[in-house]
Amino acid sequence: MLNREGMKNKTDITGMLARAGIRPTPVRILILRTLVDAARPLSAQEIETRLETVDRSSITRALMLFTEEHLVHVISDGTSSMKYEPCHSHCHDRLHTDEHVHFHCRMCGSTECLADTPIPLPPLPAGYRAENATFVISGLCPTCAAHGYKK
């Protein structure tokens, strides 16, 4: 598994798209490059802000395709918008092996990857097969906690 920095420095965006069976159009390349270069998961609106020349519907369609083809993880952090981050495991069997805990700061609103903290998977009843899991902790990030923010 590659960490975010390893992925950022070594990633061939066109190759990632091709391995996922996605045609590498200029817009898809821009959107995936934005996600790979980000220091944290991004919402569709944050991607739109970073890519002023790409319209919202193109971003939405690309994110839906990336999600369907397991090229990105979707994180629900308790806010009204989903966050997206690239799948670092490059899974060919469509099962993610790089799932990890995320932290959402209730003050500044950032959602960060805790890539070295795996999601604890509980035992499932017979017949169930896990394919995806999310785990979000909310509270104060180090910056907000250092400023003494309280409820």
Image (tube, rainbow, N blue to C red):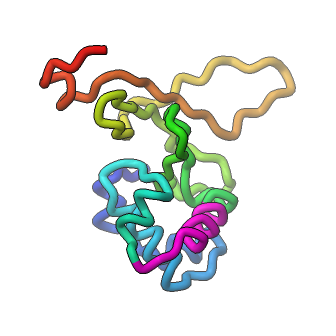
Q: Which residues are magenta?
A: 53-66
Q: Residue at x 65, y 47 (%)?
A: 95
Q: Quadrant of residue 5?
A: bottom left
Residue found at the far right of this picture: 127
Left or right side of 96 for 141: left
SS assignment for the magenta stretch, majority:
helix
- Residue 59 in percent (x, y) is at 54, 68
Up/down of 20 relative to 135, above or below: below
Q: Residue at x 35, y 48 (%)?
A: 40
Q: Is residue 146 magenta?
A: no
Q: In the rendered image, which quarter contains the C terminus?
A: top left
Q: Quadrant of residue 49?
A: bottom left
Residue nearer the viewer, 101 or 57: 57
- Residue 13 in percent (x, y) is at 44, 74
Q: Residue at x 54, y 69 (%)?
A: 56
Up/down of 111 relative to 94, above or below: above
